[in-house]
Amino acid sequence: MRVALFATCVNDALMPSTAIATVRLLERLGVEVDFPAAQSCCGQPQYNSGYRRACEPLVRRTVRAFAGYRHVVAPSGSCVATVRTAHPRIAARAGGGLAAAVGELTPRVYELSEFLVDVLGVEDVGAWFPHPVTYHPSCHGLRLLGLGDRPLRAVRGLKLLELPGAEECCGFGGTFALKNAAVSAAMAADKTAAALATGAEVLCGGDTSCLLHLGGTLRRQGAPLRPLHLAEILASTEAEPWRAP
């Protein structure tokens, strides 16, 4: 099976280890991974800020970049949710046949854990991660995609600790964190306090943006809790274990 990796701009610019781990994991499972170089931002920041017209070129670019691939996989619930929910709305108002092209693409775009469980039909990916972990479900992943922590439960050595108030937003919210910094910081403080109370060593999530937001809060606190993307945990094996940089 061949898939296209939708790395996302946040991972590409700020956390490339997430995209690298995604490729390692998929290739270990026998999946051939391509990286269409024409891909760029999905347009989520512009769309969330009310700049619909500025999103149209990015929607068109996304359609062109991933044309011809049966499956497109992204280690980001928020970007996948944007493609599925925002792109059709943008395309419907743009005209020029864009709606049909978007309608053809959206069913082929999967968040990483969706692809593993719902397409490959696998929860045990051969991962080994002997650490206590708590899982933060991002708002887009939880509310728009209905994602859970299924692949984590099959990781050997991992102790999964329930996160109190897991369904509450971490406060990032894209441009919300910029426009409402004080509220955003307070929400992150609540989320990190809940995560620290679990006694976990690692705070896992499926969206790099949330993890960067929470990670900054944890660093400023000097807290002994490390944010880590789901892909990096699933890519870790006994033969090639994850190691803190």
Image: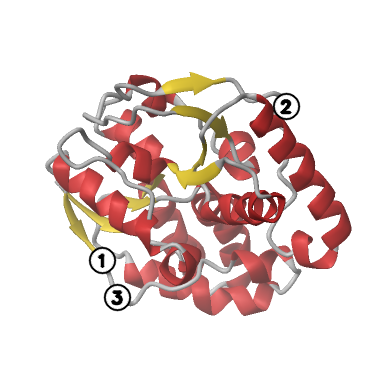
Q: Quadrant of residue 220?
A: bottom right
Say the numbered circle drawn on residue 35.
1
Q: Earlier in the sequence, mark 2 or mark 3?
A: 3
What residue would you read off at disc 2?
165
Do the residues under discs 2 and 3 have CB atoms within 8 angstroms?
no
Does residue 139 appear to the left or right of 243 in the view shown? right
Which residue bears the numbered disc 3?
37
Q: Residue at x 63, y 79 (%)?
A: 54
For the point 38% across and 49% down, the residue is: 244
* Amino acid bearing label 2: Gly
Q: Are marks 1 and 3 in contact (CB under 8 Å)?
A: yes
Q: Secondary structure at mark 2?
A: loop
**For residue 161, side relative to residue 151 (left or right):** right
Q: Residue at x 35, y 72 (%)?
A: 64
Q: CA distance from mark 2 to mark 3?
A: 39 Å
Q: Image height check: is 195 above or below 23?
A: above
Q: Quadrant of residue 117?
A: top left
Amino acid at dot 1: Phe
Q: Residues within 10 Å of mark 3 (few under 14, many from 20)?
A: few
* Mark 3: amino acid: Ala
Can you give x and y, in whole percent of width and height, for residue 185 in the image? 80, 53
Work out whether residue 224 or residue 48 is closer to the camera in this orientation and state it.
Answer: 224
